[in-house]
Image (spheres, grey):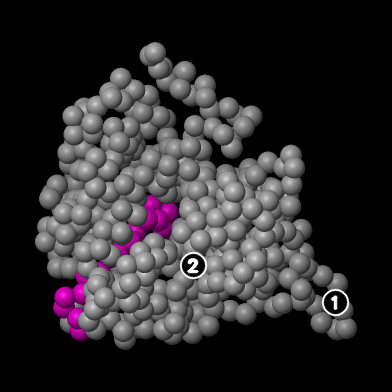
């Protein structure tokens, strides 16, 4: 049966975004779900009840009957990919029976397009099934029982989980009082490490380091521990508005043992299509290429990613949209007396002065699904992804209701819903 663009998009029902094709491509809510599964806390269909134990404690609360979810827990682009990507996907249905190497365009063409976009050569690119394949390959290639992983706490957990599963040591360095990666603390434990994972902007704290800070960090690590590899994850690169930030790709091209990971899951809105890549000097990315899974990107993914890179006005519009929604949401929390970190992503990390579980359960009663626990700040902070403007206006109203100030009792005020718990701050970084 032939498929037209109109026929394909007819599957996208404006009355039921939760089951739309766009949501399938954007994979809204799936990052939180799979993180829970990895932590051994998944529940039926990702719903489940309250978290009952210590540690991550991040099970999704159940929604009340008949309440439609606003899913702002997983840092996806709520609008999904642009028109150019959807058109490209529809055009590939006739080649769905082809292997990626035998389709037009081929997987080689995708690598060439990514290389041209980043002004490097094709041998400097390794394409992965999402950036998670890149991160997993990096752990396999560069860490061992005698070569630890150095990372932050909290940060994107993929590298930490894989290293521990393999029995490789992990040094976690707590973020600083502003929620930024403690670069000095990481340098203090880097000697002899196999891999440093530097998430910039950092997930979940949403903070970013300048290109000068990153360059200085790389130079010092290379002096102290010349064989240590540095992975700089720029998953949220397209959302950054800080003028002191720049991509580390030129740095990776000029320094050995450094590479950058990128993804199409965030600003490009294709989390469900699983497309990522690494960029670095040839010798830096060769070990990743050797571990690459064959046919790791589908025919549809190849075509979609090429189309997405060719539609940069769409990315600029997405950045502007996110910046506006983020500013509105930050203002809401500041007016409530809560303190967000300086966000440079499509999410915010906020000190709400109460356990994330308590806030999460309260918001879910109105259909607003916010982020899971992020130790060591699960008792004070919550991560909230940015939905559409319409979604966030509704969500902000729920946040105001859940966190509305309580009447003073006995001369002391407190925020509602938090049992009188006051914001605690992030604290000074240390190894944990």
- Residue at x-position 52% and y-position 52%: 33
Label 2 or label 1, whichever comes before in sequence order: 2
Which residue ends up furthest to the right in the rendered image?
410
Residue behind mark 1 = 408
Residue 351: quadrant of the picture: bottom right
Neighbour class for label 1 at 10 Å: few (<14), some, many (≥20)? few
Q: Which mark is residue 205?
A: 2
Residue 373 appears anywhere in the view: yes
- Residue at x-position 23% and y-position 34%: 100
Of residue 343 and residue 231, the one placed in the foreground of this image is 231
Separation of residues labelled 2 and 1 (CA atoms): 31 Å
Is 363 left, or right, of 122 in this rendering?
Answer: right
Residue 281 appears anywhere in the view: no
Q: Which residues are magenta?
A: 224-241
- Residue at x-position 76% and y-position 76%: 420
Residue 300 within the segment the image draws in magenta: no
The quarter in which the N terminus is drawn is: top left
- Residue at x-position 14% and y-position 57%: 286
Of residue 138 and residue 108, the one placed in the foreground of this image is 138
Q: Secondary structure at mark 2?
A: loop
Residue 239 within the segment the image draws in magenta: yes
């Amino acid at each position: 049966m032939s498929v037209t663009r109109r026929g394909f998009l007819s599957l996208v029902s404006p009355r039921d975004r939760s089951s739309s094709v766009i949501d399938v491509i954007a994979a809204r809510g799936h990052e939180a779900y799979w993180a829970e599964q990895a932590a051994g806390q998944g529940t039926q269909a990702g719903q489940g009840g309250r978290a009952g134990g210590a540690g991550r404690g991040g099970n999704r609360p159940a929604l009340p009957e008949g309440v439609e979810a606003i899913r702002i827990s997983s840092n996806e682009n709520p609008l999904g990919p642009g028109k150019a990507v959807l058109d490209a996907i529809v055009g590939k249905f006739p080649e769905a029976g082809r292997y990626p190497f035998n389709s037009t365009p081929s997987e080689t063409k995708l690598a060439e397009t990514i290389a041209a976009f980043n002004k490097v050569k094709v041998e400097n690119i390794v394409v992965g099934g999402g950036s998670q394949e890149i991160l997993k390959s990096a752990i396999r290639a560069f860490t061992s029982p005698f070569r630890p992983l150095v990372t932050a706490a909290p940060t994107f957990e993929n590298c930490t989980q894989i290293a521990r599963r393999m029995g490789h040591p992990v040094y976690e360095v707590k973020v600083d009082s502003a929620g930024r990666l403690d670069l000095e603390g990481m340098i203090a434990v880097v000697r002899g490490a196999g891999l440093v994972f530097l998430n910039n902007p950092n997930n979940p704290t949403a903070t970013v380091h300048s290109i000068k800070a990153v360059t200085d960090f790389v130079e010092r690590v290379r002096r102290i521990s010349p064989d240590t590899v540095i992975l700089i994850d720029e998953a949220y690169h397209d959302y950054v508005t800080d003028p002191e930030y720049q991509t580390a790709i030129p740095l990776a091209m000029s320094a050995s043992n450094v590479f950058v990971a990128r993804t199409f899951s965030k600003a490009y809105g294709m989390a469900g299509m699983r497309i990522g890549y690494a960029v670095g000097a040839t010798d830096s990315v060769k070990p990743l290429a050797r571990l690459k899974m064959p046919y790791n990107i589908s025919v549809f993914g190849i075509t979609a990613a090429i189309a997405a890179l060719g539609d940069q006005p769409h990315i600029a519009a997405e950045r502007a949209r996110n910046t506006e929604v983020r500013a509105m949401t930050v203002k809401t929390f500041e007016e409530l007396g809560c303190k967000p970190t300086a966000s440079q992503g499509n999410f915010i990390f906020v000190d709400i002065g109460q356990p994330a579980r308590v806030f999460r359960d309260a918001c879910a009663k109105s259909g607003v699904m916010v982020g899971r626990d992020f130790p060591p700040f699960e008792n004070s902070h919550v991560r909230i992804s940015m939905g559409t403007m319409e979604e966030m206006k509704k969500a902000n109203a729920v946040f105001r209701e859940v966190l509305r100030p309580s009447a003073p009792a006995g001369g002391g005020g407190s925020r509602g819903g938090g049992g009188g718990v006051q914001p605690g701050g992030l604290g000074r970084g240390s190894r944990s």
